[in-house]
Image: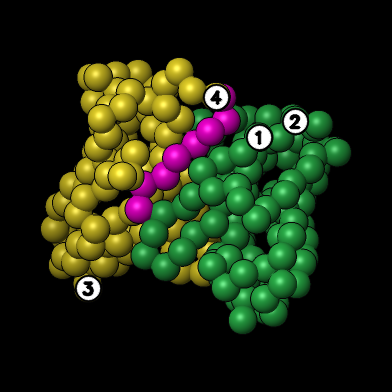
Chain colours: A green, B yellow
Amino acid sequence: NAGVTQTPKFQVLKTGQSMTLQCAQDMNHEYMSWYRQDPGMGLRLIHYSVGAGITDQGEVPNGYNVSRSTTEDFPLRLLSAAPSQTSVYFCATGEGTYEQYFGPGTRLTVT
Amino acid sequence: TQLLEQSPQFLSIQEGENLTVYCNSSSVFSSLQWYRQEPGEGPVLLVTVVTGGEVKKLKRLTFQFGDARKDSSLHITAAQPGDTGLYLCAGERYNTNAGKSTFGDGTTLTVKP
């Protein structure tokens, strides 16, 4: 029972490149979410999903796309990376926002 | 403007001291959660409070949800070095889209031996 897994753990991109951050859960939770955390700050919600086929925008969605074709997976796509997207990205899952279980994070640097 | 304001931003104390950190908002929340995050790791849920005035205890940690559901506090008794970490409050604002959670910027706690 792995819980929430995120890949890769670290990534360096050049400005303009695209990539997908993977998130998978084996807890059979309907709710999944993506956050970014910048130094000295809390987490800001990028996108979330309340079930397969349903996604919605969070606080900072620009530059990111998501899809939810299965309960288990919730990938986050960076369309054209920018230095402002340098951050640590966390995926979370739960029965809802009442209790979220976070993955270990992906540390992304855009040069 | 942060929806959830946490204070203090930094707190450094000696082992054995007591402390309280705060999470305040001008908005009403359906529930509030407290998480602790250690460097290089994701946040870990400590507690969820749902009812106004609710008090929950987790060993030396006491959590309170304000009567109006706009604020919360976390009190630690006899702090230990293992309590060191970033404490985050989070919640879903009442009467908004289900699933839209917001976080405060956190309180960084250092407990010195």
Q: CA distance from mark 3 to mark 2?
A: 48 Å
Q: Chain of mark 4?
A: B
Nearest to viewer (mark 3 / mark 1):
1
Residue B77 position within the rendered picture, expressed as x and y whole percent measured from the top left: 20, 49
Instruction: Kindly indicate whether the residue at mark 2 contacts the one at mark 1 (C-beta within 8 angstroms).
Output: yes
Determine crowd level at label 2: few under 14, some 14-19, many 20+ residues with C-alpha closer than 10 A. Answer: some
Q: CA distance from mark 1 to mark 2?
A: 7 Å
Q: Are marks 2 and 4 in contact (CB under 8 Å)?
A: no
Which residue type carries mark 3? Answer: Pro
Q: Crowdedness of circle 4 by 10 Å Cα count: few (<14), some, many (20+)?
A: few
Q: Quadrant of residue A93?
A: top right
Main SS of the magenta part reads loop
**Of callouts 3 and 4, the N-terminal one:** 4
Is residue A102 visible from the viewing direction of this image?
Answer: no
| Residue A55 falls inside the magenta stretch | no
Q: State the residue position of label 3.
A: B113
What residue does disc 4 label? B97
Q: Secondary structure at mark 1?
A: strand
Chain letter belonging to callout 1: A
Q: CA distance from mark 2 to mark 4?
A: 13 Å
- B38 with respect to A67 (left or right): left
Q: Are marks 3 and 1 in contact (CB under 8 Å)?
A: no
- Residues at badges 4 and 1 in contact (C-beta under 8 Å)? yes
Whole-angstrom CA distance, mark 3 to mark 4, is 44 Å
Residue B86 falls in which quadrant of the image? bottom left
The segment highlighted magenta reads B98-105
Answer above or below: position of A73 versus A28.
Answer: below
User: Which residue carries the number 1 mark?
Assistant: A56
Indicate left or right for B101 with B18 as reference. right
Q: Nearer the viewer, residue B26 or B86?
A: B26
Mark 3 vs mark 4: give the one in front: 4
